[in-house]
Amino acid sequence: QQQVKQSPQSLIVQKGGISIINCAYENTAFDYFPWYQQFPGKGPALLIAIRPDVSEKKEGRFTISFNKSAKQFSLHIMDSQPGDSATYFCAASMISAAGNKLTFGGGTRVLVKP
Amino acid sequence: DAGVTQSPTHLIKTRGQQVTLRCSPKSGHDTVSWYQQALGQGPQFIFQYYEEEERQRGNFPDRFSGHQFPNYSSELNVNALLLGDSALYLCASSFKAEQFFGPGTRLTVL
C-alpha cells in the first residue's frame, strides 16, 4: 500500500515541447505530493508540491495536476529546455506527528533535444 | 544560508567494515531523514530523526543506525557492510512538510 508507480521510465522531447510524467499511488492516507529534479551526481531538488485539496498547482513552467478520485498526479513541463534534461521523481507522504517519510516513484529520465 | 551539507562526498570501504556518514541540516530545520538511492532507482527511506529520537523507520536492518545531536545534525552508521550497501546516501532536512536534500555521500563497498 506504500507504492508509488511512475511512468514513463524515460522520454525524449524537442526543445519547446511539453514533457508529461505520471504517477499513481495506492495509499489514500497520503496527503503531500512533491516532485523532485535530480541531475547526475547531485541530490534531488524540490521542484513543486501539491496537497490533495487542490487539483492543480503551477509554478513557472512546471504544473502539477492532481486527481484524488483516480489516485493519480502528473507533472507537466511546458516549453521544455535542454537544461531541463534530468531525472524526475514523484513522491508521496503522510504528514503526521509520527513523521513524514517520502515514498518515491522509480523516476523518469527526461532528455530535451535542442 | 547554506543548504543541507553532507560528508564525506565519496567513500570506499570493504565488506564487513563499518561506516559513519554525517549531515548538517538547513538553518531552522529540526528534522533529518536519511535515504538510500541505488543506481537508477528512486530514494528509499531509511529513518527519520526529530528531537534526537528516531521517529520513523523504513524497511532496513538493524545494521543501519543513526543519531541526531542537539544542534540537529545527524549521523548514519552502517555496520558489517555488504556489497549491496553500495549506493548514494542522501540526507534531507525539514521543518514542516518540505524536505530538502543534500548532495549525498557515494558509498562503494568492495
Image (tube, coloured by chain):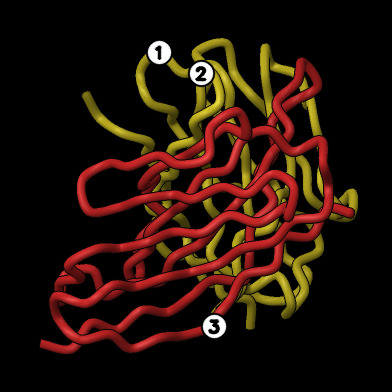
Residues at marks 2 and 1 touching, judged by CB atoms closer than 8 Å: yes
Q: Residue at x 55, y 67 (%)?
A: A22
The chain letter for the residue carrying disc 3 is A
* Sequence-first disc among 2 and 1: 1
Discs 2, 3: same chain? no
**Depicted A61 relative to depicted B75: above or below:** below
Q: Residue B95: which numbered mark, if any?
A: 2
* Tags 2 and 1 both on a single chain: yes
Q: Position of residue A26 (x, y in %)?
A: 82, 54
Name the element at disc 3.
loop
Q: Quadrant of the image for the C terminus of chain B?
A: bottom right
Instruction: Name the residue: 18% across, 89% down.
Output: A113
- Which dot marks residue A64? none
Mark 1 and mark 3 on one chain: no
Image-quadrant location for residue A107? bottom right
Quarter that holds the N terminus of chain B: top left
Q: Which mark is residue A9?
A: 3
What amino acid is at disc 3? Gln
According to the image, label 1 marks what residue? B28
In the image, residue A89 above or below residue A82: above
Q: CA distance from mark 2 to mark 3?
A: 31 Å
Q: Chain of mark 2?
A: B
Q: Nearer the viewer, mark 1 or mark 3?
A: 3
